[in-house]
Image (cartoon, rainbow, N blue to C red):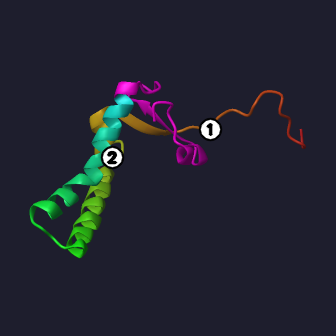
Amino acid sequence: WSKGQTLAMKTWHIRVVDRDGRPLTQARALLRYVLSWIWVLPPLAAGGLFTLSGAEVSVLFVGWVLIWAILARFHPERQFLHDAMAGTRLVHYKPPPPPGKRRWWM
């Protein structure tokens, strides 16, 4: 993320930037990574704390991810909570074609 994109993000032309649209620093990328674990850790912690079965942890996990995703719909900029807390956002990014490349129809 510190370079702004993962391989999957390149495919979908998505880039991670800070609130002002600048590339992420290493510190902000690390903060976003740590905060993104909020998607996973609470259901796993609850499963360990209450000695739940694998099926119960799975239900908790799916429910938690759904709640997490639904919360993004209520954010004014439709951001996930970890992006809002880290001061990052996802933007559409279409890289310019390489110089000197001509299309066959041009």
Q: Is residue 74 left or right of residue 23?
A: left
3D distance between C-alphas at marks 2 and 1: 22 Å
Tell me the quadrant of the picture where the C terminus can be found: top right
For residue 94, above or below residue 21: below
Taking the spot 35% from the left edge, 39% from the top edge, the residue there is: 33
Question: Tag 1's secondary structure?
Answer: loop
Q: Which residues are magenta?
A: 1-27
Picture coordinates of residue 17, whole percent (x, y): 44, 31
Q: Which residue is mark 2?
A: 80
In this orientation, which residue lies closer to the viewer: 77 or 43? 43
For residue 100, above or below residue 63: above
Picture coordinates of residue 76, whole percent (x, y): 31, 43
Q: Are marks 2 and 1 in contact (CB under 8 Å)?
A: no
Residue projecting furthest to the left: 50
Q: Which mark is residue 94?
A: 1
Tell me which amino acid carries mark 2: Phe
